[in-house]
Amino acid sequence: MLKEATDIQEQIKADYEHLHACPEVGFELTETRAYVKKRLLEMGYEPVDCGKAGIVATAGNPETGRCFLLRADMDALKIKEEAEIPFHSTNGNMHACGHDAHTAMLLGAAKIIKYHEQELGGLVKFMFQPAEEILEGARDMIANGVLGQPKVDGAMMVHVMTGVPLKTGTIVVSAPGVSAPAADFFEIKIKGKGCHGSMPHMGVDPLTAGAHIIIALQEIQAREMSVFNKGALTIGALEGADVANAIPDAVTLKGSMRAFDEDVRNHMKKRLSEIAENVARAFRAEAVVAYTSGAPTLVNDRELSEKTGIWLKETLGEDMVIRSQDMPGQSGGGSEDFAYVSHEVPSIMVALAAGDSRDGYERPLHHPQMRLDTKALAYGAAALAEVVMRYVKV
């Protein structure tokens, strides 16, 4: 599979560069979806819409064997690109998380699998998903039947990583169990009473309440969680106050929390609401907590984890595949809405080194200057195709 992927490396790279130059966000993927559909039609597939902006294509025989799903996300971030590359984005968005690479690699895998379609003993589903960055796309496609008709028996995704000291093309296979934390995005709306800045006694200051809420929330991790429990709670935005000599009526805090354990997640959510509401009340204000989006923990199936490691070592080479538990240091805490799939069917997530920090690719994902080493694309496409061919072999 690596040889076949290398043979079409230039096409995968061309797909990647095209997608990178026109990044779109959320469910608004007009150009991206049109391009993916065009490429699938050129390969002989019959892509169909799924949900708000998803695309599904299939290969193989739905009447025999097992069904395996390969997933790629298609959306970008609202980040202005600063990377100096010829196919630089100019629309104010950026594929800073590598979803353009994910889509290009899945298109590459689709081309390889189409060539081997008669050898399949089952069915392959290609899931091109929108809105991963807002953790809503996978849930939408699941609600619209992506895992049924026929029922999916297993699933896989590849996520690129940059800014790490790993040789480009190296695959990191997730250990059985949780590899990505649950995520919850929230808003805390704090209502006070606006007044002139020279007469604070005439109002109720929501900014003061908000500041004390931010500080008080740190106690959840510092004093209510064991050192063995991993979690993170971040306030990233404070909106509603922009006049120097006035106290506003209301402000909104926006943030996110992550947890690798569902019990820890539920405790953090419960305590966030209790602390926000009671601290605001202490300052004569009112706080209302609302959760805007989120995703559960991503769970990797034991059998798929073990077999994926074996299969990929055979096709990519022993030195190009490592287990996540053998990685030095701590892994990141980024969440993934592929988690919704992993709670429905046995699943595996693998990471692909696509920018060795020792070779000048020092910027991490979500950085405006992040770049990918395109030599990784063939490895990602080969990994997807190899696992599918082994899983649904005759």
Image (spheres, rainbow, N blue to C red):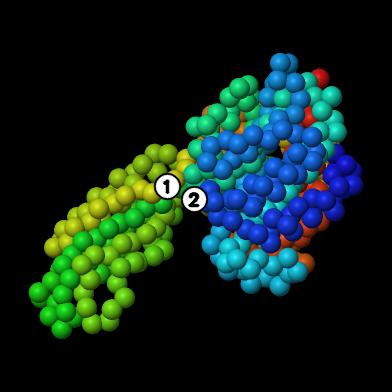
Tell me the number on the disc at residue 213.
Answer: none
Q: Residue at x 17, y 62 (%)?
A: 285
Q: Residues within 10 Å of mark 2 (few under 14, many from 20)?
A: some
Q: Residue at x 75, y 21 (%)?
A: 61
Q: Quadrant of residue 382?
A: top right
Q: Residues within 10 Å of mark 1 (few under 14, many from 20)?
A: few
The residue that disc 2 covers is 134
**Gap between marks 2 and 1 measured at Cα:** 7 Å
Q: Taking 53 as reference, is 239 left or right?
A: left
Tell me the number on the disc at residue 293.
Answer: 1
Q: Are marks 2 and 1 in contact (CB under 8 Å)?
A: yes
- Where the N terminus falls, by quadrant? top right
Location of residue 318 in the rendering, given as x and y in whole percent from the top left corner: 82, 43
Query: Looking at the image, which is closer to me, 128 or 365?
Result: 128
Location of residue 388 in the rendering, given as x and y in whole percent from the top left corner: 75, 32
- Residue ranking furthest to the left: 202
Query: Looking at the image, which is closer to me, 166 or 30?
Result: 30
Q: Quadrant of residue 113?
A: top right
Location of residue 7 in the rendering, given as x and y in whole percent from the top left corner: 90, 47
Specify whether residue 159 is in view: no
Q: Amino acid at mark 1?
A: Ser
